[in-house]
Amino acid sequence: MRTKVRLHFKNKGDNMNKVKILQSGDLHFDTPFKDLNKNISLISKEELLEVFSRIINICVQNSVDILLLTGDIFDNLTVDKKL
């Protein structure tokens, strides 16, 4: 299914409000890291959550209006509730 997006741009003389958008993609929160040993896998999962926490903090500190998450947010159809 295709979605059409229509954008409206105001003339330069119009008062335009700027919108801050931060884009992040392919987070794969539930990646099992199967190729790594158990200890490194757990560390990698914790680091991924820390990176997302930093993304949120950047949004707050910079008054970002929209956080756009693209690509795969999860790897699997079922998600662990603690995520």
Image: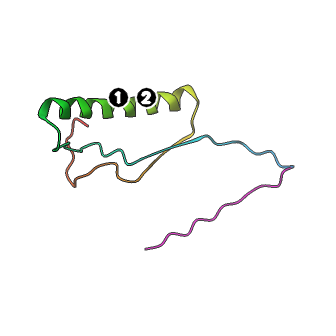
Q: Is residue 42 left or right of residue 58?
A: left
Q: Where does label 2 land, which residue? A: 54
Kindly identify the amino acid type of the residue bearing the numbered disc 2.
Arg
Tell me the magenta residue range.
1-12
Residue at 21%, 39% in the rendered image = 81
Q: Is residue 9 left or right of residue 34?
A: right
Residue 52: which quarter of the image?
A: top left
Residue at 70%, 60% in the rendered image = 8
Is residue 5 a member of the stretch shown in magenta? Answer: yes
Q: Where does label 1 land, which residue? A: 50
On-image quarter of the C terminus: top left
The residue sitting at the right extreme is 13
Q: Position of residue 26 (x, y in %)?
A: 38, 48
Residue at 64%, 42% in the rendered image = 19
Circle 1 residues within 10 Å: few <14, some 14–19, many ≥20 = few
Q: Position of residue 79 (x, y in %)?
A: 21, 46
Q: Position of residue 64 (x, y in %)?
A: 57, 36
Circle 2 residues within 10 Å: few <14, some 14–19, many ≥20 = few
* Element type where label 2 sits in the image: helix
Q: Is residue 32 left or right of residue 9?
A: left
On-image quarter of the N terminus: bottom left
Q: Is the residue under label 2 in contact with that under label 1 (CB below 8 Å)? A: yes
Residue 9: which quarter of the image?
A: bottom right
Judging depth in this view, the residue of 25 and 66 nearest the camera is 25
Kindly identify the amino acid type of the residue bearing the numbered disc 1.
Glu
